[in-house]
Structures are given as structure tokens and as C-alpha cells.
């Protein structure tokens, strides 16, 4: 299925989690998220967990956390 991360199309398997998709997209970004340096948001701007599910055409945005 196709999903979008920061506007980039990513092909991922059906049933993938947000973590799986980010791992495929960029392992360094996943590392930043796990270290609390970045966070993931859905298309509506809601903070979401990386363990959450994805569906065809899901859109997530990853943002650096600034203090």
C-alpha cells in the first residue's frame, strides 16, 4: 500500500505500523523519534504513536522537537 511521510510516497506492506514505515523511509529519523528528538503527527496535526496502524494513503508528518 502507499502512504505518505512528510509528503514523500512510501510503499509499505498492508498492516504496517507507523514504525515500520518510518524504518523503511529513514532509519535515522526513527532513531530520533525513539530518542525523543522528533515526533509523529497525523494529517490533522494530532500526535500519534509509532505503534499505530497505517491505511492506504495515510499521511504522517515527522517534526523535530524544539525546546
Image (tube, helix red, strand yellow):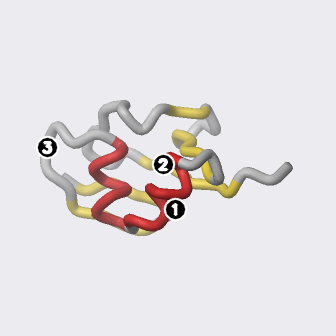
Residue at x-position 46% and y-position 67%: 28
Classify 9 as above or below 17.
below
Is disc 2 placed on a helix, strand or loop? strand
To which residue does mark 1 refer?
6
To which residue does mark 2 refer?
60
Quadrant hosting residue 46: top right
To which residue does mark 3 refer?
14
Quadrant hosting residue 44: top right
**In this orientation, which residue lies closer to the viewer: 27 or 15?**
27
Q: Give the Cα separation between the discs numbered 3 and 1.
A: 20 Å
Badges 1 and 2: C-beta atoms under 8 Å apart? yes
Is disc 1 placed on a helix, strand or loop? loop
**In this orientation, which residue lies closer to the viewer: 28 or 13?**
28
Q: Give the Cα separation between the discs numbered 1 and 2.
A: 6 Å
Q: Give the Cα separation between the discs numbered 2 and 3.
A: 16 Å
Residue at x-position 50% and y-position 46%: 34
Q: Residue furthest left?
A: 14
Residue 31 screen position, x and y as percent: 47, 57
Amino acid at each position: 500500500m502507499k502512504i505518505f511521510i512528510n509528503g514523500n510516497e512510501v510503499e509499505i506492506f498492508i498492516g504496517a505500523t507507523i514504525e515500520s514505515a518510518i524504518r523503511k523511509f529513514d532509519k535515522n529519523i526513527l532513531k530520533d523519534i525513539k530518542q525523543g528528538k522528533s515526533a509523529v503527527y497525523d494529517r490533522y496535526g494530532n500526535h500519534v504513536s509509532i505503534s499505530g496502524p497505517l491505511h492506504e494513503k495515510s499521511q504522517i508528518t515527522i517534526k523535530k522537537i524544539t525546546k
